[in-house]
Image (spheres, rainbow, N blue to C red):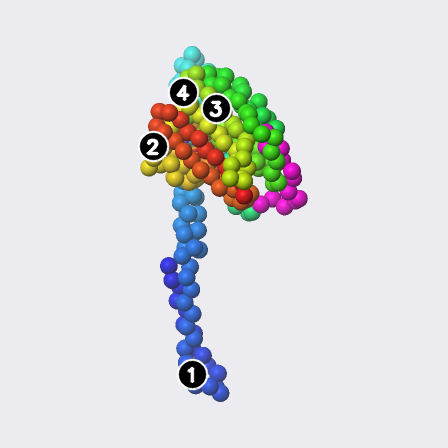
Amino acid sequence: QLQFFANPVTDEDVNAGVLCLVLDITEKYNREKLRREFTANVSHELKTPLTSISGYAELIESGMARDEDIKGFAGKIHNESSRLLELINDIIKLSELDEGVPSGEPEEINLLELARDCARSLEKYAQDKRVTIQAEGEELTISGNRRMMHELVYNLAENAIRYNKKDGTVRIKIGRENGKTFILVADTGIGIPAEYQNRIFERFFRVDKSRSKATGGTGLGLSIVKHIAGAHKATLECKSEVGQGTSIKVLFP
Ligand code: ADP
C-alpha cells in the first residue's frame, strides 16, 4: 500500500516546484485491517451468548416457560454468562499484551516448578475429561514475566486436555536442545490437520467452529500464547498428526 503526498513549494527565492513524498504504509494498512477484523469478530462472539441469554430470560419473564423447564433455562443463562465472562477476560488480556511487555524487572522463573503448578491447577479439569497430566524434565530457569509465562503454559496445557481423547495423556516437558531451553506440551488428542497448523495462532481461528460451544474456549488462547512468546523472544513450533496428537514447543533464545 502506498500513500502519496504532493505539496507545492512556494519559497519566493527559489523556483516553485513540487515536493513529493511516497510512503510505504503496508504495515499500517495490515495492522488496521487486522484491527477491523478483530472488532467484527469480537462483536459477533459477544452477540451470540448475549442473544441466547436474552432469549431465555425473556421466555421466563413472559410466564410461558413451564415450571419444570425454568431450572434448565437458568442453567443455560449461567453457562452463556460464564462463556461471556471468559471471552471478556481474554479480550482484556490481549489488549494489555497489545500495549507491550508489562514494565518491571524480569524475574528468574523456574520452569519446572511453573509447569508443575499448571499441571496441579488443571488436575481437576483433566480428571473430568479422563485425561492424565504430568510435568517433567530438567530444573531450568529463564528470565521473564512469571504471570505471563504461567498463562502461556496454562493455555497450552488446557488445550492439550480440551482436544484430547478419553484416557489420553498430556505431558509438559522442560528441557534443552541445541543450547536452547524449551517448554514442550504434548498430547495424545485429536490432532490438527496440516493445512491449519500455521493458522491456530490467529485470533478467533478454530479448526472446528461447530464444536467450540461444546468444548468451550474463546478462540483467543493461542493468540495470547503467541503474544507472550514474542514478548520473551521465544519461537513456537507446532507438530501434529490427525488422530495421534499435537505437540507445541516454545523455544527460548
Ligand atoms: P480455543 O479457545 O478454541 O481452544 P485457541 O486459540 O486456544 O482457541 O486454539 C485455536 C484452535 O486450535 C482450537 O479451536 C483448536 O481447533 C485448535 N487447537 C489448539 N490446541 C490444540 C490441540 N492441542 N489439539 C488439537 N487442536 C488444537
Image quadrant in which you'd find residue 210 = top left
> Considering only order in the chain, which callout, 4 or 2, is on the residue closer to the N terminus?
4
Residue at 62% x, 33% y: name it: 110
Frontmost of labels 1 and 4 is 4
Ligand 1: does it lie within 8 Å of the C-beta at label 3? no
Return the mark for residue 193.
2
The residue carrying mark 1 is: 16
Alpha-carbon span between mark 4 and mark 3: 10 Å
Q: Amino acid at mark 3?
A: Val
Give the residues drawn in magenta, as a range.
101-112
Frontmost of labels 2 and 1 is 2
> Considering only order in the chain, which callout, 1 or 2, is on the residue closer to the N terminus?
1
- Badge 1 element: loop
Evaluate if marks 2 and 4 touch, with contact meaning CB atoms under 8 Å apart. Answer: no
Residue at 40% x, 26% y: name it: 245
- Badge 2 element: loop
Up/down of 201 relative to 20, above or below = above
Return the mark for residue 170.
3
Q: Confirm whether residue 110 shows in the render.
A: yes
Alpha-carbon span between mark 2 and mark 4: 16 Å
Dot 1 crowding, Cα within 10 Å, few <14, some 14–19, many 20+:
few
Residue 237 image offset from top left, x and y in percent: 44, 37
Residue 183 image offset from top left, x and y in percent: 52, 33
The residue carrying mark 4 is: 165
